[in-house]
Amino acid sequence: MFLTPLAYEYSILTQVAAEENMGYSDFLEGILNYELRSRHGRHEQMLLRMADFPAIKTLHNFDYNFRS
């Protein structure tokens, strides 16, 4: 569906816009940027699933004491 993440957050985004006295063009820019960031995030998650990595590894779990 088109603009799906925006549909879930629309009421919150409109409240923020009202509190900050945003103009219509600033509000439109904000919601479109929100949608774009959401799409990039979904795209990144899809690529990670498609890569089919055996495990997720982070620097937090890295053993820095293990040096040979």
Image (spheres, helix red, strand yellow):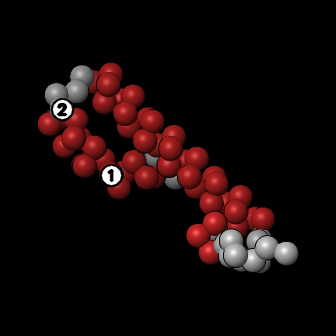
Q: Residue at x 78, y 65 (%)?
A: 51
Q: Position of residue 24 (x, y in %)?
A: 27, 24
**Measured along the vertical axis of the image, is residue 11 above or below residue 58?**
above
Residue for badge 1: 9
The x and y percentages for residue 63 are 68, 76
According to the picture, the residue beneath numbered tag 2 turns out to be: 20
Label 1 neighbour load within 10 Å: few <14, some 14-19, many 20+: few
- The C terminus: image quadrant: bottom right
Residue depicted at x 18% and y 32%: 20
Q: Does residue 40 appear anywhere in the picture?
A: yes
Q: Residue at x 39, y 48 (%)?
A: 6
Image quarter for residue 28? top left
* Along the viewing direction, whichever of 25 and 59 lies nearer the viewer: 59
Q: Nearer the viewer, residue 18 or 57?
A: 57
Whole-angstrom CA distance, mark 1 to mark 2, is 17 Å
Where's residue 32, x and y in %?
Answer: 44, 35
Give the answer, above or below, for where 40 lies relative to 64.
above
Q: Say whether disc 1 or disc 2 marks the residue closer to the N-terminus.
A: 1
In this view, the mark in front (1 or 2): 2
Instruction: Name the amino acid type tagged 1.
Output: Glu
Which element is circle 2 on?
Answer: loop
For image coordinates 37% across by 33% down, the residue present is 30
User: For residue 52, which quarter of the picture?
Assistant: bottom right
